[in-house]
Image: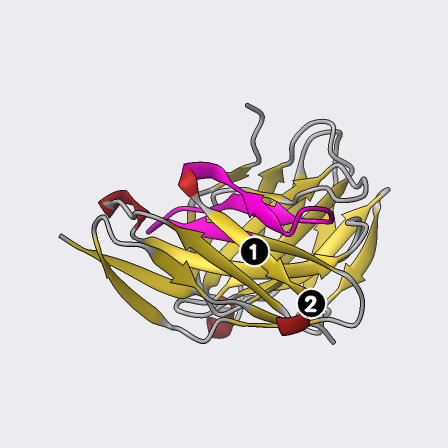
Amino acid sequence: EPEVTQTPSHQVTQMGQEVILRCVPISNHLYFYWYRQILGQKVEFLVSFYNNEISEKSEIFDDQFSVERPDGSNFTLKIRSTKLEDSAMYFCASNLGTKSDTQYFGPGTRLTVL
Amino acid sequence: AQSVTQPDIHITVSEGASLELRCNYSYGATPYLFWYVQSPGQGLQLLLKYFSGDTLVQGIKGFEAEFKRSQSSFNLRKPSVHWSDAAEYFCAVGALGGGADGLTFGKGTHLIIQP
């Protein structure tokens, strides 16, 4: 069964450094998403992406964040200058984009900012 | 704005007993409702979803959920829990039609199974 994959599973970085989190969505899916989950808290929507542009973003997704689909398979989330409060689990998701479709989630990348 | 409330932070159930996890939502239109499960250190796995039609939906692992529009609820049930059901359960709501809209999640219910 096709699945969303994410790399790395765990990323440790120093405050102020740039990080890129990578995702490979399910191959025939058209919509891609990033969510984050701060430890012990709920999963929060960050951004959705369709047809090579951002479709929707939350207030969390400020200028420090950017997304890109650099090729036909990868979908990346970049945090330009990490802060301590960016420490969280980041989930990528994708769906076909048709009515009633389900978002399928990857296993997540745990980001630790020191 | 849409919101999801899961009133129970923790629930403890004996193995073999029945389970009901509560979920209430607030949404201005017809919602698209999900239950996801997250085992420790794992990602989110879809248990079931409601889009339209029959208000009682069946999911994987023996779970079911019932959509009650009058109560704005989408409670998750299982007739007999197994120790492997211990996990975090999230209810989520999305806009009808899928597409670009992000899902709004509840804070989750942590399920503990007693032997």
Name the residue at 71% across, 74% down: A59
State the mark number for residue B66: 1
Apparent side of residue B91 relative to residue B112 in the rendered image (left or right): right
What span is colored magenta in the figure?
A: B35-61
Residue A101 in percent (x, y) is at 72, 41
Q: Measured along the vertical axis of the image, is residue B101 above or below residue A95?
A: below
Q: Circle 2 marks a residue in which chain?
A: A
Q: Measured along the vertical axis of the image, is residue A92 above or below residue A65?
A: above
* Residue extending farthest left: B115
Residue B3 in view here = no
- The amino acid pointed to by label 2 is Phe
- Nearer to the camera, A7 or A98: A98
Tag 2, which secondary structure? loop
> Which residue, given by chain and number where applicable, does mark 2 sit on?
A61
Q: Are the two marked residues, 2 and 1, in contact with CB atoms closer than 8 angstroms? A: no
- Nearer to the camera, A23 or B6: B6
Residue B49 in percent (x, y) is at 61, 48
Give the position of the C terminus of chain A as an image quadrant. Answer: bottom left
| Tally of numbered discs | 2
State the mark number for residue B86: none
Residue B69 is a magenta residue: no
- The amino acid pointed to by label 1 is Glu
Give the position of the N terminus of chain A as an image quadrant. Answer: top right
Residue A73 in percent (x, y) is at 69, 30
